Amino acid sequence: MNEFSRRGFLGLAGAAGVAGLAACAGTGTAPSSGGNGGGASSNTIEFWSNHPGNSKPVEQQIIKAFEAANPNLKVKLVDAGKNYEEVAQKFNASLAGGQLPDVVVVSDVTWFNFALNKQLAPLDDLLSAAKIDTSDYVDALYNDYNLDDKHFALPFSRSTPLFYYNKDLWKAAGLEDRGPKDWDEFLTWAPKLKAAAGSDKVVMELPDGSNYLDWVFQNMVWGYGGAYSKEWTPTFSDPNTVKAGKYLQDLAKNGFLKLSKDPAPDFTAGIVGCSMMSTGSLGGVAKDAKFDVGTAFLPGDGNCPTGGAGVGIPANITDERKKNALKFIEFLTNAQNTVTFTQATGYMPVRKSAVDLPEEKAFLEKNPNAKTAIEQLPKTRSQDNVRVLLPGGGARIGKALDQVVQGQDVATVFKALDAESQQVFDSQIKSKLGA
């Protein structure tokens, strides 16, 4: 699967592609409809979603409840793409003219460019006018959408990676029923797991560079004291970042690691011992696996990146539409509905009070793997800028990591990644910061 097919328009890896993004999405041009979104009705809220975690049925359920509570409003759920990047591509196209949505799903890697170019509405004044208290949102998730002390989305389908493992294989290998404390310990486990797994199974499978290897690999990088960047300065050539890259490469060379489009099917089929996958995969994994699934914190202490998506409001729609859109967003992400949504999908509750609801307490008691993500949340950290805030950052990193796993020299690949990332920052971002 090539990287364009997964990343979509916002994920173009080349410098020419990034320049094209600036030309199309960086203008802040209002739609030709003069802000009314191509004739959209002011009492119909158009919600553009990729239905993260196969969530369309539960989104429809929440919409039905919202319409019952607000009989003067309707919500039109639009299939806006099969992933976050396709939603961003559709939203980007709408900015050039045509019908804008009222509410749009924006991911960890797509919201910033739209906010920077004043295409998403800052929500703080809207929230204040509606007397919505944001203190109940999980702080780390709410503040992920902060630019110049303004918030441009509210958390919705939020996730972190988890360490998933096959408890049966762990037992056969004589290992404790837990995840590795760090990646050095995992390296001592890998030969035992390989011996127990046999030649027809793989110790670890991770998503490839076109499918968010760049997200989960941050854990390895941080674990070895490296980083993708310090603020806006790329640091791929830092010796500790290179060390993490060599570790990843050696896992593959030694036959412990396989990359794929999606590790979940192989993992649930029992032919993969472990993986790092989103909490959003938990519902499907728990349903499909024919063995006892274990989940654990990512290796290391405090080295787990946040991820997933929020929901934002376009800047160039009428104030009335913004007001109605915010009413729906608040309902969509309230404590009760974040419980409904996350229990159906495996994502994390975005409200602090959600874990105190009786139905959530009962669910976590019966589903301890879901509790892992919530307990790991205080140990998460926001992702490095050059992945989530630099246009095309994730795709560039993913492409480089594929090259590393294929055997190319790590230091050489990462040095080129530093240079390319710096060029994109200088040409796309630097002049707009603080504007």
Image: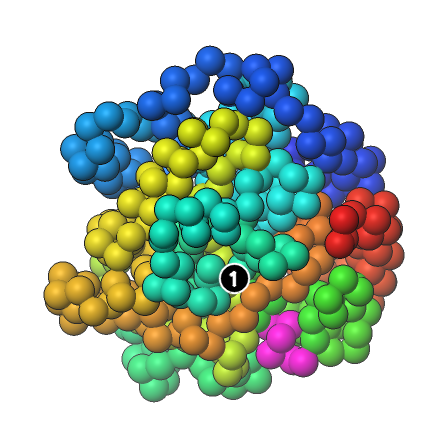
**Amino acid found under the numbered disc labelled 1:** Asn
Answer with left or right where residue 183 lies relative to residue 288.
right
Residue 402 percent coordinates (x, y): 67, 54
Residue 228 vertical position relative to residue 68 in the rendered view, above or below: below
- Residue at x-position 68% and y-position 60%: 385
Q: Is residue 24 visible?
A: yes
Q: What stretch of residues is rendered in magenta?
A: 220-225
- Residue at x-position 76% and y-position 62%: 232
Query: What kind of secondary structure does the magenta stretch mostly adopt?
Result: helix
Residue 223 covered by magenta stretch = yes
Answer with left or right where residue 199 lies relative to residue 116.
left
Residue 366 percent coordinates (x, y): 15, 67
Residue 227 vertical position relative to residue 385 in the rendered view, above or below: below
- Residue at x-position 76% and y-position 53%: 433
Residue assigned mark 1 = 143
Tally of marks: 1
Bin the neighbour count of mark 1 within 10 Å (Cα to Cα): few under 14, some 14-19, many 20 and up.
some
Q: Tell which of 204 and 218 is nearer to you.
A: 218
Residue 390 covered by magenta stretch = no
Residue 247 percent coordinates (x, y): 66, 74
Classify the position of the N terminus by image quarter.
Answer: top right
Residue 233 percent coordinates (x, y): 80, 65
Residue 238 vertical position relative to residue 358 in the rendered view, above or below: below
Answer with left or right where residue 228 lies relative to residue 164.
right
- Residue at x-position 34% and y-position 40%: 327
Q: Tell which of 85 and 309 is nearer to you.
A: 309
